Image (cartoon, helix red, strand yellow):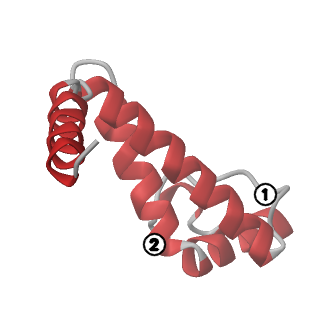
Amino acid sequence: MTLVDVMVLLVVMALVGCGRGETPQQKATARLARAETAMEACKQRSGLAATPTPTTVILDDPATKGQMLTPQMADQLRMKAQCRIELDELLEARRGAAPGQ
């Protein structure tokens, strides 16, 4: 096989690989899986693996306003601050993967 043959083969393989692109739903599902993995890794690094993942990034949640701060609420606040980038991506990926999107 000559160098030209190898180059032609590589170009053909690249074109075939590009031809079978993912559907938008497959991309959204893959993004969600990556975001969930990143969030779990951040929770592990922060020592918050047992804490439920927040459903919002709002620090002063009106639903808990006026309540005494519990250890779980404190952990949620800590996670919202320490894992903010991962949480933003996870919540956005969840919205993108929702049916009808």
Q: Nearer the viewer, residue 34 or 71?
A: 34
Q: Position of residue 37 (x, y in %)?
A: 62, 52
- Left/right placement of residue 63 relative to residue 58 reads right
**Helix, strand or loop for disc 1:** loop
Along the polypeptide, which appears first: circle 1 or circle 2? 1
**Helix, strand or loop for disc 2:** helix
The residue under the point 58% across, 73% down is 83
Residue 82, picture quadrant: bottom right
Query: Label 1 sits on what residue type?
Result: Thr
Query: Label 2 sits on what residue type?
Result: Ile
The residue under the point 76% across, 77% down is 46
Quarter the N terminus occupies: top left
Up the image or down, 51 lies above or below 77; here it is above
Count of labels shown? 2
Q: Residues within 10 Å of mark 1 (few under 14, many from 20)?
A: some
Which residue lies most toward the front here?
1
Find disc 2 in the rendering and name its residue.
85
| Circle on res. 51 | 1
Nearer to us: label 1 or label 2: 2
Q: Position of residue 62 (x, y in %)?
A: 47, 61
The residue under the point 47% across, 56% down is 56
Q: Position of residue 30 (x, y in %)?
A: 43, 37
- Left/right placement of residue 52 relative to residue 2 reads right
- Left/right placement of residue 89 relative to residue 4 reads right
How far, Cα to Cα, is label 1 from label 2?
17 Å
| Residue 68 appears in view | no
